[in-house]
Image: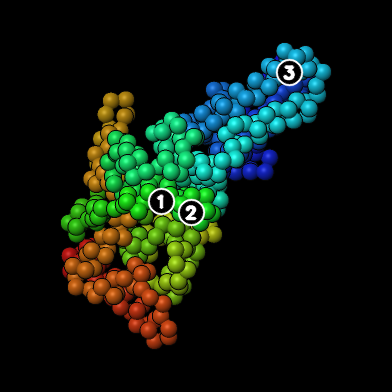
Amino acid sequence: MATLRLYLDRRIVKDKTAPAPLKLALGHKGNTALIPLNISVTEAQLDRRGNKITNHPNKAFLNDYITQRMLCAQTVILQMKMEGEVDRMDITTLKNHIAAALSNEPEEEAQDKGLFLPHYRKFMERKGNPHTREIYSLTLTHLTRFARDIGSLRFEDITKSWLTDFDNYLARTSPSKNARNIHLRNIRAVFNDAIDEELTAHYPFRKFKIRGVPTAKRSLTVEELRTLFACDCDDTQRKYLDIFKLIFMLCGINVIDLCNATKISGGRLEYNRAKTGRLYSIKVEPEAMEIIGRYRGKSHLLDILDRYGNYKDYAKRLNESLKRIGHTETGKRGKKTFRPLFPQLTTYWARHSWATIAASLDIPKETIAAALGHGGNTVTDIYIDFDRKKIDEANRRVLDWVLYGK
């Protein structure tokens, strides 16, 4: 009897932490053939024994999709067996029968361009950025859970009332209005694209407005910063606290720019900001240089990318660890209990805190903006030198006030 299982194809993707194509492995007469599923997951997200996806934000949607594909393939095999054809087929012929059946599933051959779901998926797949596709995929998971008939809905079926109900549904698990707005904006983008392609003239967002709310301020006071910096934490927490301090001492440098930094030249850290591409330069004060000295890297300024495959993995671990920084108590059997000082702490707090404290010292807004990399493009070396001098002076004032109270 032919068999089916999930197979993660790593013949091209060698990095075990990177997503690789997930395929159906068809076994027949001692041979194996692979059938694409058009899904990519990491090794950690595949439960080989259970033939399912785990530890994935869209696991419910993906497992439903995989179950449907497996069922379709198994139906083909069973039908061929009942007709006495399986035993006479080689694996290539059987694979082609299954692939043909999968490509002709009702959902995929639906030609009605007025349906919302097929166009949503096409729009999502056109997104070049994997992170963007992941966000759209998460929205799709919410949509399929909210509307069981999503596959048959036309654009005209999605009205202001429908969107309001969907927003209320999201609010059950996501009280943040701004977080819910991400999913609503994704739907709006699909509508805009469908209108551009003349698939519909219906546009419920004329009446349904997506309104955000101000975000909570994410900064520490001077006293809170001093408490944090003086925290007697363990060695594991210490290295994450040091990086937070370094971000603060470098005027709230972004994690990606800190990870990618390669060297200090003339006492200055110079780099092109990843976000804007603009050349940026900051004087590295002795306190920051001391921290850098503890974590020197091989090919980069710091050893972060010596230990992590990319800055995103490190940024996630860093932010998770910052939330736990505080006093550690060791109980029975050596179990550690963390008493975090600031449970919401992230690297962004270092950036906000620097700006807030700088403002409290009456440092001009233009200088603060330039220090954060928000300044406009300069034209001549005179203005560049002026900006650098002002930023250097501002940073030294902030550090002196926070670290030494002067």
Residue at 62 percent of width and 36 percent of height: 109
Residue receiving disc 3: 80
Helix, strand or loop status at disc 1: loop
Residue at 35 percent of width and 53 percent of height: 206
For marks 1 and 3, give the CA distance: 47 Å
Q: Amino acid at mark 1?
A: Tyr
Q: Amino acid at mark 2?
A: Ile
For marks 2 and 1, give the CA distance: 8 Å
Q: Identify the image quadrant of the C terminus.
A: bottom left
Residue at 55 percent of width and 26 percent of height: 67
- Of callouts 2 and 1, which one flags the residue occurring earlier in the amino acid sequence? 2
Query: Could you tell whether 3 is left or right of 323 in the image?
Result: right
Location of residue 126 with respect to 368 vertically, above or below: above
Q: Amino acid at mark 3?
A: Met
Location of residue 57 with respect to 280 vertically, above or below: above
Q: Nearer the viewer, residue 342 or 262?
A: 342
Tell me the tag on residue 195.
Answer: 2
Q: Nearer the viewer, residue 388 or 147?
A: 147
> Where in the figure is residue 258, as x and y percent of width and height?
43, 60
- Of callouts 1 and 3, which one flags the residue occurring earlier in the amino acid sequence? 3
Helix, strand or loop status at disc 2: helix
Helix, strand or loop status at disc 3: helix
Tell me the tag on residue 203.
Answer: 1
Query: Could you tell whether 308 is left or right of 37 in the image?
Result: left
> Where in the figure is residue 100, as x and y percent of width and height?
70, 31
Q: How is the image coloured?
A: rainbow
For marks 3 and 2, give the CA distance: 44 Å
Q: Nearer the viewer, residue 135 or 258?
A: 135
Label 1–label 3 contact, CB within 8 A: no
Label 2–label 1 contact, CB within 8 A: yes
